[in-house]
Amino acid sequence: MSNYKSIVLLIFLASIASWFDFIAVLSLFASDSKSGPLDTALVSIAMLAPPALLSRHYTRLVNKYNLKAGLTFALLARSILTFIILFFVNNYLIALILLACRAAFSGLFAPQISLIASNVVDELKPKLSAHISLANNVSKLVIPAAGGALAVAFGNTFVILLGGLILFFTALFAFFSLSIINTQNKETKKTGSPIDANHKLELTHAGLYYFLVFSMSNLLPYIFHDIGSGTLLFSIAISCSAFGNISAGIILSKNKTNIYRLQFLINALFTCLLFFVIYLLITVKFNYALPIVFALTGYFSASIQVNITNNTISLTSEKATSYSARFQSTQNIAMLAGPIFGATVIEYFSSELLFLTSSLIGVVYFTSTILISKRTKYESVH
């Protein structure tokens, strides 16, 4: 099997395990352990904070040690810790520590994969970026529902065990299927981070975008209830969003040209304009049109992920590792901070005002950034 196919299948398997695991762990601690909202929030923090805090260390570790051995070890460590957590689910403090340790190993996956993908021939990188997005979004569409059904039938513990087993076989697959040239960089310690000012600016753009997205996406069940729409419309909207995600992956996989960074800004701007459309639909009580808009947001959201992935793996090996780790850190911080902002706006104002506020912030920021970028000919040059 070629490295191209191995990378896509590896990401697909790891994504399946992660979705099984994420849903089951939160459900287990929320119900089986009879924990309160704060306890459940701490579980989320334990799963998101380590990758956000360890990005610099990930860059050094990935560049220093044998890549195939490191990838296999990190996946096996995640699998083993998954099994161990089940023995301590009633000991909340130990379970949190184990979750944080496992999350620390999980954070290695993105920079490791980015380093491997950066060695794929340049002509295939745009297509690979789209296929990676497609693999992630197919698992996102199918696995949460499948995991929920399995949890109802067999319990959360079974789903966590299944996720651990998938991680174990993913580790074996990585070890036996990937053909990796030694990409260790002995000069990494001396040269420090290879991220330059333009890349840091890109991370700022991505950070704001994901902050705005997560301020709403993690609160959507409550928002749909708050605006008077039932669970059915919410489910349809989420399915339409996933359909948009997958459509973008399929369409962009046919793109054989390089993707410029400016496209990320344009896609982000269109997403924020759609937030304003959602605000208008909620205001005029035309909620049944929301699934159509969610399909469009899903398309642009997946397009943005393809833009970012392509830009990452188009960098040199050193920069791809560092950029991927920094991006993962930025995204996880947004996942933690965004819902706090969203919940505050909804608590003191309203759900529709959250969409209006996020839209205005995004439109002003990304419009001005696009104008500046065009003026300075801000293109992807590696």
Image (cartoon, rainbow, N blue to C red):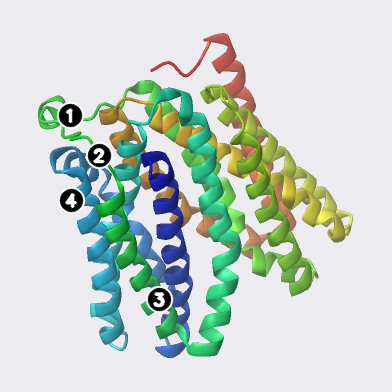
| Residue 58 shown left or right of residue 15 in the figure | left
Query: Callout 1: few (<14), some (14-19), or many (20+) C-alpha neighbours within 10 Å?
Result: few
Amino acid type for the residue under numbered disc 1: Gly
Can you give x and y, in whole percent of width and height, for residue 35 in the image? 42, 85
Distance CA(mark 2)–CA(mark 3): 28 Å
In the picture, residue 367 is in which quadrant?
top right
Q: Earlier in the sequence, mark 2 or mark 3?
A: 3
* Image mark for residue 162: 3
* SS state under label 4: helix
Amino acid type for the residue under numbered disc 3: Leu
Q: Earlier in the sequence, mark 4 or mark 1?
A: 4
Distance CA(mark 4)–CA(mark 3): 23 Å
* Image mark for residue 69: 4
Q: Nearer the viewer, mark 4 or mark 1?
A: 4
Image position of 223 with respect to 26: above or below: above
Q: Which residue is mark 1?
A: 192
Q: Residue at x 69, y 48 (%)?
A: 244
Most extreme residue toward the front is: 1
